[in-house]
Amino acid sequence: MLDGEPRGVPVTSPSPPRPPWQDPPPRNGIQEKQEHMRVIHEAPLAPMTTLGIGGPAAALIELHDPADFPEFVALADTFPGEPVCLGEGSNVLVSDAGCAGAVLRMSTKGVRMAGNTADGRVLVEVQAGHLLADLVATTIAEGLTGMEMLVGIPGTTGATPVQNVGAYGQETADTLVQVTAWDRKLRRMVTMDAAECGLGHRTSVFKRSRRWTLLTLVFALRRSELSAPVTYRTVAAALDVPVGSRVPLDEVAQAVLTVRRSKGMVLGCSGSDDRSVGSVFLSPEISPAQAEGLRARHAPVNRFPDGSTRVSASWLIRQAGFELRRPVVPGVRISSLHYTLVAEEGATAAGFRQAVDMVFQEVLRRTGVRLTSEIDFL
Ligand SMILES: Cc1cc2nc3c(=O)[nH]c(=O)nc-3n(C[C@H](O)[C@H](O)[C@H](O)COP(=O)(O)OP(=O)(O)OC[C@H]3O[C@@H](n4cnc5c(N)ncnc54)[C@H](O)[C@@H]3O)c2cc1C
């Protein structure tokens, strides 16, 4: 736990320059520039999402300096309806009509070392708008293990607890210690420890809730030049090491990136598949009887850290007869590298939802397993 104010020097503030694919999109709306806060009326949201779909926000309020937060909240309250948070838009589907209320965009940046835990882990405090990719790069450069497998995941650090972001054997729950958030119900700032965040498999108390706006996050990481054990066969194969090996942090990160690129899971490297939210569906939890039946069909069935047994959603989608690159509805098709949905010319939010429903129905009919969508619908 943190003992009072975080100590130490800033490690990175602000973030390093973004790669070209992460450049902020041009803003067409009317802009009112405030000192650290930007308000854009009728702001187009599609360019702020990786799917590139959706209508405008009545008002987009962008926070750059955490000190402006009280003003930020007061301003959001002047708009009708519940405000919604937006990070990098890599896990959202914005409706074609857009958002009638205020959209709060977290653009606060900064990482700093905030002391140590009693067991010697290093506490790292991060602003919500800091890109996860930049945070992972910083932790690797600092010789800290705990996040190296999360390399290549787009989005902001503030969004990581929302669905307990994870990949290749690591997830937010492994390292998150506490968050500070604005609690819209209590109308005050709160500090929540990891247990209060209710982190589960791609879920938390924040998922599908508008109650909290996450502002800062504290993670506890171990000093080590070596990674956590490599538990995924594909990553071990890319490294040419046995499963369970620990390798230098930057080497494991490169291997994870190689595997992710081969599936079109790194934005900017997937060409026509880039209008994506990653995996549209969670790997669904299955019963022991279903697991036995699916294993007999050589399905990838795995145990997860929360104790659940799950089958790969992409395997189910393939079994249901969907083919790579094939359109599902106009403007939405299966990716060319992975069994997930991507958008293309002419995509609409209504069409994307329809494609999600069609995949759900067909997987249920052909395999008896119910998929759950991972995306947040704004
Ligand atoms: C190519 C690709 C690969 C991906 N791979 C993975 C993966 O391997 N593992 C994985 O878990 N996810 C993956 N994702 C999904 C996505 O990157 C994560 O969910 C990420 O955390 C979303 O961050 P964001 O900033 O883009 O959030 P957004 O998409 O902007 O928002 C997502 C949700 O979080 C809420 N939110 C955002 N910021 C805050 C805040 N500060 N306070 C409160 N609520 C907030 C939003 O309201 C929304 O409900 C992938 C996506 C893509 C496009």
Image (spheres, rainbow, N blue to C red):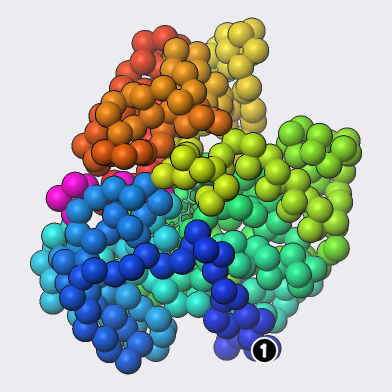
Splitting the image into four quadrants, where does ligand 1 fall? bottom left
In which image quadrant can residue 325 be found? top left
What type is the residue that disc 1 sits on?
Val
- Residue at screen point 67% across, 58% down: 147
- Residue at screen point 15% across, 50% down: 97
- Residue at screen point 39% across, 71% down: 106
The crowding category of the residue bearing disc 1, from other C-alpha atoms within 10 Å (few below 14, some 14 to 19, many at least 20), is few
Residue ranking furthest to the bottom = 35
Kindly report the secondary structure that dominates the magenta region of the rendered protein: loop
- The magenta segment is 91-98
Does residue 241 appear left or right of residue 200 in this picture? right
Closest to the observer: 115 or 51?
Answer: 51
Residue 163 magenta-highlighted: no
In the displayed structure, would residue 60 be above or below residue 246? below
Does residue 4 appear left or right of residue 67 in this picture? right
The residue tagged 1 is 9
